Amino acid sequence: MRIAMLASLVVSAATFVPRTSLRRTLQSSVVSRFMSSTEQQGEYDYDFLVIGGGSGGVRASRIAAGHGAKVALIEPQLQHGAPNYSAIGGTCVNVGCVPKKLMVFAARYPGEVGEAAGYGWNGATPGDFDWKKFMEYKDTEITRLNNVYNNFVLGNAGVEIIEGFGALNGKNAVDVHMTQSGETKTLTAKNILVAVGGWPFKPDIPGIEHSITSNEIFYLDEQPKRMVVVGGGFIALEFATIMDGLGTDVTLMYRGDLFLRGFDHDMRAHLKEEMENNSSINLQFNTNPTEIIKNDDGSFTVVDESGNRVECDAVMYATGRKGKIENLNLDSAGVHTENSFIPVDEYSRTNVPGIFAVGDITDRIALTPVALMEGHRLADTVFGGMDRPVDHEYVAQTVFTTPEIATVGYSEEEAAEKFKDITVYKSRFRAMKHSFPKSETYSMFKLIVDDTTGKVVGVHAATDGAGEMVQGMAIAVKMGATKADFDNTIGIHPTSAEEMVTMRTPSYSYKNGVKVE
């Protein structure tokens, strides 16, 4: 019975039943059963058809091909830009992580130059930012990456790339509407992966058609002199600080009391304070736009619920993302959906045998490295004879604001609820880099420890380069490092990071989930 259950797992059983790891004594049996099954797939065109060429789809297809599967990947657009924006490489490469990070780098130069006088560099100025030149350089870089994915990442792996829109036609077929010719052809496969990602959500208010999103901002012909950014998540915060750094007059509107809901409260409050003290961003909380008016001169007026009006040259909405399930014809195969997403189990299986989903379309953790992990583990399980469920605990992430916020593990609020008895260590200070030129820029570090095990279950940092720092911390946390392990680690001096291994005195604790000062 146990062997039968494990074999059915590898060939994509439909039931959502949690599985434990394969015992080594059973693994060879499972692999042989799966391989004999895939070897008999002659009735299909492919072993594996992947709809969507983003991070999860590319990784799954490449790894599957490496295991010997015949794989094709379907992507509507192989080069970045309108109308689909997210071409081969996905949101991250085309209109996400990569071009955004390039803009982050550009936006931070004025701040660096602003402290130069404190180090003896008289007369230093940032100069004038050339939006057109930057976008030209950006386009060249993204085109290069598109070609790398086409010719090397997938091409060298033996994955067939098909430029077209894919939609299910039953459980084992995909209709592909070819982008170039407009023709439609039907392909069959034993296994199908849906990895089409997400799309920016915009509310239905008058004038919303005048707004842009994190897609269009990378293709604006001119830099807006004044911009309203609507939203309170990391995308809204990042672009607000980016545009402010580049010299745009930014107003950030958020309907809640404090942005970055879901992150540790101390980090959220610290970022708010830093933005108020060290940026020119007009922060408007408890503010919800109700209308966007296009004026005769081409500018816009944003009107909120209270009737307040803000004039601007661009309105960017970053109010969440939805799954791109439209036109996938999921009903033809009976694939279950919830809202705009596809629910899956820990092996990325949908409710239909042989149909899987990974990445943002599953509404788990919408981060590129998470999609990579999900796609890789799926391919290893289905085509490599391994037992590799996804693992979403202790996933590090960074908000690329100024300062950056990086985190791994549980927030203070989450840890108190889950572990009940915890100890919190906090430190707020001026880093040497900012202290010397007498800048009022502060860092905050925070460790959260589970008292029962002594393990560090949360690491949070708001500082320059926090992402680079916490990536290393994430390894320790993932491995189960204790506070004693942190204390036994010798710091690198002088660095801000050494604060992580020198915080000795608890700030406060929780007993049975209740804070004790």
Image (cartoon, helix red, strand yellow):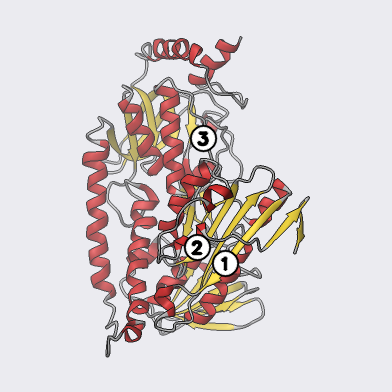
Which is more toward the observer, 216 or 398? 398
Residue type, numbered disc 1: Ser
Q: Are marks 2 and 1 in contact (CB under 8 Å)?
A: yes
Vertical order, 313 against 147 (above or below) = below
Within the image, what quadrant is residue 112 found in?
A: bottom left
C-alpha span from label 3 to label 2? 32 Å
Callout 2 secondary element: helix
Position of residue 110 measured from the top left corner of the image (x, y, whole percent): 34, 79
N-terminal-most mark, 3 or 2:
3
- Of tags 3 and 1, which is closer to the observer? 1
Question: Going by the picture, which residue comes out furthest to the bottom?
Answer: 123
Vertical order, 232 against 490 (above or below) = below
Tell me what residue is drawn at x 40 percent, y 57 percent.
468
Is residue 376 visible in the rendered structure shown here? yes
In the rendered structure, find residue 499 and report the number of the disc placed on it: 2
Quadrant that contains the N terminus: top right
Callout 1 secondary element: strand
Identify the residue position indicated by label 3 in the image: 390
Position of residue 190 measured from the top left corner of the image (x, y, whole percent): 42, 21
Vertical order, 285 against 398 (above or below) = below
Callout 3 secondary element: loop
Identify the residue position indicated by label 1 in the image: 427
- Of tags 3 and 2, which is closer to the observer? 2
N-terminal-most mark, 2 or 1:
1
Tell me what residue is drawn at x 49 percent, y 20 percent.
10
C-alpha span from label 2 to label 1? 8 Å
Position of residue 16 measured from the top left corner of the image (x, y, whole percent): 61, 27
Position of residue 385 measured from the top left corner of the image (x, y, whole percent): 43, 19
Tell me what residue is drawn at x 48 percent, y 53 percent.
397
Which is more toward the observer, 195 or 478? 478
Residue type, numbered disc 3: Val
Within the image, what quadrant is residue 465 found in?
A: bottom left
